[in-house]
């Protein structure tokens, strides 16, 4: 069982991480809406999904990111003359977002670990229920009114989960420094 307070906390933590890490610059517009309320922004079928995981003793978070593979997304994340692929850029941006979520959660759950991001076919999205999640929510994220991606947050628990995260707008933003544990 996951309490409403924990669900709200995960959402606030994700919103802050998305606004500061899914954007190339923190001043860029980042609109986030629940996917069920805005289904038209879904990335194109056949796209890949990037999978990132944060695990603790009590729960596992699976963050699934689907970047639309279109000109606006490539221009935003790759820029001019980029030497990397959209998948590589997406994994880097996704890892930063997941790391920001991890930094917020470690205050409440000190035993967290993150996985290395990997890509799967978006066909796997139809099998999320196989993970037996206690909580799943999806968001359509629009950056700078042009770049669209879908973020799905899936929380699987091995014990009841209840916490209230104190998320403030002016939380410390690291530049991606290496943290040693």
Image: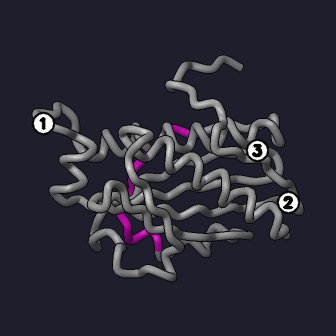
Return the residue at label 3: 56
Residue 2 seen from this side: no
Which residue is painted at 66% across and 51% down in the image?
13
CA distance for labels 3 and 2: 12 Å
Q: Nearer the viewer, residue 53 or 90?
A: 90
Q: Going from the N terminus, do you reach mark 2 or mark 1 first?
A: 1
Q: Is residue 181 above or below residue 118?
A: above
Q: Is 159 left, or right, of 39 in this rendering?
A: right
Measured from the top left, where is residue 44 in percent x and y? 27, 71
Measured from the top left, where is residue 7 in percent x and y? 74, 65
Labelled disc at residue 139:
none
- The residues colored magenta run 115-125
Observer-side mark, 3 or 2, equals 2
Observer-side mark, 3 or 1, equals 1
Return the residue at label 1: 80
Determine whether the residue tagged by mark 1 lies in a helix, strand or loop. Answer: loop
Residue 160 included in the magenta stretch of the image: no
Determine whether the residue tagged by mark 2 lies in a helix, strand or loop. Answer: loop
Q: Nearer the viewer, residue 87 or 145?
A: 145
Return the residue at label 2: 161
Determine whether the residue tagged by mark 3 lies in a helix, strand or loop. Answer: loop
């Amino acid at each position: 069982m996951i309490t409403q307070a924990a669900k709200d906390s995960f959402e606030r933590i994700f919103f802050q991480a998305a606004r500061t890490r899914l954007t190339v610059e923190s001043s860029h517009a980042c609109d986030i809406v629940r996917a069920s309320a805005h289904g038209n922004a879904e990335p194109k079928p056949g796209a890949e999904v990037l999978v990132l995981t944060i695990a603790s003793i009590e729960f596992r978070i699976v963050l699934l990111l689907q970047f639309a593979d279109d000109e606006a997304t490539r221009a935003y994340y790759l820029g001019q003359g980029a030497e990397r692929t959209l998948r590589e850029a997406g994994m880097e941006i996704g890892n930063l977002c997941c790391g920001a979520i991890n930094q917020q959660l470690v205050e409440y759950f000190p035993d967290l670990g993150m996985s290395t991001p990997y890509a799967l076919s978006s066909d796997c999205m139809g099998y999320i229920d196989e993970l037996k999640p206690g909580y799943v929510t999806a968001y359509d994220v629009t950056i700078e009114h042009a770049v669209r991606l879908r973020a799905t947050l899936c929380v699987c628990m091995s014990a009841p989960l209840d916490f209230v995260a104190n998320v403030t707008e002016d939380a410390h933003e690291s530049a991606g420094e290496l943290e040693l544990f």
